[in-house]
């Protein structure tokens, strides 16, 4: 009798247990796995992996803490690897140059831009030595021009090339050489390894350049209009609420002590808002220099 009674009570509990399980399934978020996945942050490798990690890990940690979700910085060893990851949309949050953004804008949405040296924008420049005797762009015909980085460098190649084109100089009208970065291009110019150098307006004021050469010996030959600084973007497929949260955190960073420390680590003075149309001037220059496909060759 006791065994039968116990068995009967077990049958009575089964519908209740099933209802409880159904209720728990309904109340538990169906997207818990996706929400718990880390957001991947990429930064273009204009510096070494070690330096990029040192500069931007505080930012990924800051965003992760504020979002309540892991943000993982994944630095790249070179531009080829970085660009492959951009094209395959492996980054949820990405910081890169203006050329890289306009080429990836189909899949990424710009939400902010960096502020450096307290400025939102910077011009592309053609530099020469003061004692060179060069006062007009046309005088660079047949001369050597050194550019910092590669043909995908917005401020140190595309913008200066645009200035040369506007003055009537085609690519075969001068000798093109490349330095590893804009800073090295200025150093090479100073030591007469080239007759002119392409770079961003602020490169002459950077400590690494001022420590290496007598910057007073270098002058601006020609300048583009100011161009908005480096963009920050997120996947277009990212939920709108998350996009808004990340954008708000980036823009508000300069308003708190903790945020200011993160910016200082990344060698920024702040982050400003940005939208796609802000990069139309960059697009126009890129098309003029690299053609309608905007692809560096």
Image: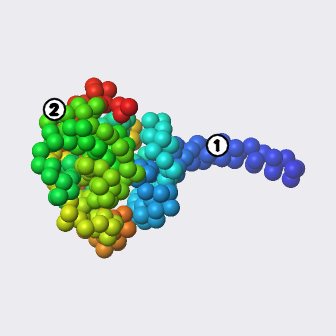
Can the viewer see residue 101? no
Q: Secondary structure at mark 1?
A: helix
Q: Number of callouts in the render?
A: 2
In the visual, does 118 lie left or right of 181?
left
Looking at this view, is 17 or 217 the one in front? 217
**80, above or below 185, in the image:** above
The quarter of the picture where residue 187 lies is: bottom left
The quarter of the picture where residue 276 lies is: top left
On the rendered image, what quadrant is the C terminus found in? top left
Which numbered disc covers residue 18?
A: 1
- Residue 152 rendering spot, x and y as whole percentages: 35, 40
Residue carrying label 2: 168
| Nearer-N-terminus badge (1/2) | 1
Q: Residue at x 39, y 37 (%)?
A: 237
- Residue 142 rendering spot, x and y as whole percentages: 24, 38
Q: Residue at x 20, y 63 (%)?
A: 217
Looking at this view, is 60 or 203 the one in front? 203
- Residue 121 rendering spot, x and y as whole percentages: 19, 53
- Residue 154 rendering spot, x and y as whole percentages: 29, 44
Q: Residue at x 20, y 60 (%)?
A: 218
Q: Secondary structure at mark 2?
A: loop
Disc 1 crowd rating (10 Å Cα; few below 14, some 14-19, many 20+) is few
């Amino acid at each position: 009798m006791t065994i039968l009674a116990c068995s009967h009570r077990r049958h009575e509990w089964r519908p209740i247990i099933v209802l409880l399980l159904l209720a728990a399934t309904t109340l538990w978020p169906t997207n818990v796995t996706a929400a718990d996945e880390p957001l991947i942050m990429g930064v273009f490798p204009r510096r070494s992996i070690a330096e990029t990690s040192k500069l931007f890990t505080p930012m990924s940690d800051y965003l992760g803490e504020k979002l309540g979700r892991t943000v993982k910085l994944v630095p790249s060893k070179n531009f080829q690897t970085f660009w492959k990851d951009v094209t395959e949309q492996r980054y949820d949050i990405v910081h890169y140059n203006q050329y890289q953004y306009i080429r990836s804008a189909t899949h990424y949405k710009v939400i902010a831009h960096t502020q450096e040296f307290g400025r939102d924008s910077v011009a592309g420049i053609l530099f020469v030595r003061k004692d060179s005797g060069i006062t007009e762009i046309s005088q660079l015909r047949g001369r050597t021009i050194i550019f910092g980085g590669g043909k995908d460098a917005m401020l140190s190649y595309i913008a200066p090339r645009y200035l040369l084109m506007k003055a009537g100089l085609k690519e075969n009208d001068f000798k093109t050489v490349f330095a590893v970065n804009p800073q090295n291009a200025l150093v090479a110019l100073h030591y007469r390894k080239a007759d002119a150098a392409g770079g961003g307006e602020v490169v002459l004021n950077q400590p690494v350049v001022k420590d290496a050469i007598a910057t007073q010996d270098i002058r601006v030959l020609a300048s583009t209009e100011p161009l908005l600084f480096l963009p920050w973007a997120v996947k277009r497929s990212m939920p709108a609420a998350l996009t808004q949260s990340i954008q708000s955190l980036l823009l508000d960073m300069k308003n708190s002590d903790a945020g200011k420390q993160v910016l200082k680590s990344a060698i920024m003075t702040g982050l400003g808002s940005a939208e796609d149309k802000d990069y139309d001037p960059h697009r126009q220059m890129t098309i003029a220099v690299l053609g309608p496909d905007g692809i560096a060759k």
